[in-house]
């Protein structure tokens, strides 16, 4: 049973959410609060499995309450707010929120398709495996020095991420030098219109130059080529460019599109990194990299917010190495030096 705490200054929204969850057998409302300060106190008392938290509230806003909750009583937090913009979204992620979601129109709470996706997100974030203490897990199959010597030195890095990815990607890029000799291409599943804010947020944490792929660009070292929302990015011999093709696994941009195209160009000289996220996007792309002789680093379960995409890659034998998030940047650098 997943215990939910609802923190929202709107009595109407709290009432709607309680009604929505009353139709489920495995989700219960443990309590509710009307502002961030009361929410922090309720977390201390109720120890919920998941907090659904608004941003714009009296007394204490959602970002500050997220910061306090994650410092004192860490638990998964889903930001659900009508005041979502790129800056707010990524500040919430930096404070410790696992995911950010714009409040739907009230009519959508009666839409079976919306509810199915909403309940899936709630169950994944609120499950006991959604938040893990690294110290309580054994790390296995992690990159070892003798295995690094067997990898090819890559000429390009491709990264894919979904739920929990913004903070994970920022962690990795902050650990890489600005003079990285090879380019990085990145697909992050984002809400439409959030790509510019994500680019700026990443640029504030890394010496690399994060650029948005809105036209064909030559791939050069020291840069991170970020997919726009609602467009794939494709790699060919002349560089990287946006593509308006159909969704893949219901995703656009799709990690698989990037990974598959880059694999066909760079073959054994490609390094793929697949991070936390729901679903299976990127798993087949990892397999194409491995089959071409390239190397893939897949985030481990303990450090993943959602162990979906990395798990799918690992299960199909498409993970060269399973690596904790805090070791990912170092692993990339050791592979580049091949020692």
Image: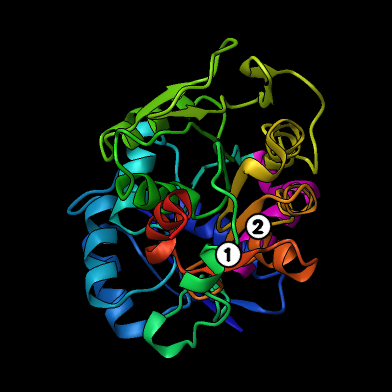
Based on the displayed image, in which of its 4 quarters is residue 275 positioned?
Answer: bottom right
Q: Residues within 10 Å of mark 2 (few under 14, many from 20)?
A: many
Label annotation for residue 306: 1
Assess whether mark 2 and mark 1 are in contact (beta carbons under 8 angstroms).
yes
Q: Which residue is mark 2?
A: 278
Q: Residue furthest left?
A: 59
Horizontal side of 176 relative to 314 (left or right) equals left
Q: Residues within 10 Å of mark 1 (few under 14, many from 20)?
A: many
- Magenta region: 107-124
**Majority secondary structure of the magenta segment?**
helix
Residue 234 vs residue 178, the one in the foreground: 178
Queried whether the magenta region covers residue 105, the answer comes back as: no
Q: Which corner quadrant holds the C terminus?
A: bottom left
310, above or below 223, in the image: below
Mark closest to the chain's N terminus, 1 or 2: 2
Count the numbered circles shown: 2
* Location of residue 215 in the rendering, given as x and y in whole percent from the top left corner: 58, 10
* Location of residue 330 in the rendering, given as x and y in whole percent from the top left corner: 37, 59
């Amino acid at each position: 049973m997943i215990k939910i705490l609802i923190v929202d200054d709107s009595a109407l929204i709290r009432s709607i959410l309680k009604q929505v969850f009353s139709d489920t057998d495995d989700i219960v409302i443990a309590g509710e609060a009307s502002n961030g300060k009361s929410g922090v106190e309720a977390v201390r008392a109720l120890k919920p499995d998941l907090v659904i938290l608004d941003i714009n509230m009296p007394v204490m806003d959602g970002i500050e309450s997220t910061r306090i909750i994650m410092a004192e009583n860490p638990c998964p937090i889903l930001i659900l707010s009508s005041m979502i913009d790129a800056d707010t979204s990524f500040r919430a992620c930096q404070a410790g929120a696992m995911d950010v979601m714009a409040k739907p129109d009230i009519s959508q709470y009666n839409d079976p398709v919306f509810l199915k996706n909403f309940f899936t997100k709630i169950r994944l974030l609120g499950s006991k495996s959604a938040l893990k203490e690294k110290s309580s897990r054994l790390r296995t199959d992690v990159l070892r020095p003798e295995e690094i010597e067997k990898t090819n030195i890559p000429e390009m890095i491709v990264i894919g991420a979904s739920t929990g990815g913004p903070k994970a990607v920022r962690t990795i890029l902050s650990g890489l030098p600005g003079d990285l000799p090879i380019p990085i291409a990145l697909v992050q599943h984002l809400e439409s219109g959030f790509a510019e804010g994500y680019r700026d947020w990443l640029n504030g944490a890394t010496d690399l130059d994060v650029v948005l792929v809105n036209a064909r660009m030559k791939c050069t070292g020291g840069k991170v080529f970020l997919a726009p929302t609602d467009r794939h990015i494709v790699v060919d011999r002349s560089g990287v460019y946006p593509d308006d093709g159909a969704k893949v696994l219901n995703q656009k941009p799709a990690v698989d599109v990037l990974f598959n195209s880059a694999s066909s160009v760079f073959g054994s000289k490609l390094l793929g990194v697949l991070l936390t996220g729901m679903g299976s996007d990127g798993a087949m792309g990892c397999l194409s990299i491995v089959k071409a002789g390239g190397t893939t680093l897949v985030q481990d379960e303990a450090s993943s917010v959602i162990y979906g995409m990395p798990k799918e890659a690992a299960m199909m034998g498409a993970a060269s190495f399973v690596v904790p998030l805090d070791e990912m940047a170092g692993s990339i650098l050791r592979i580049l030096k091949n020692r």
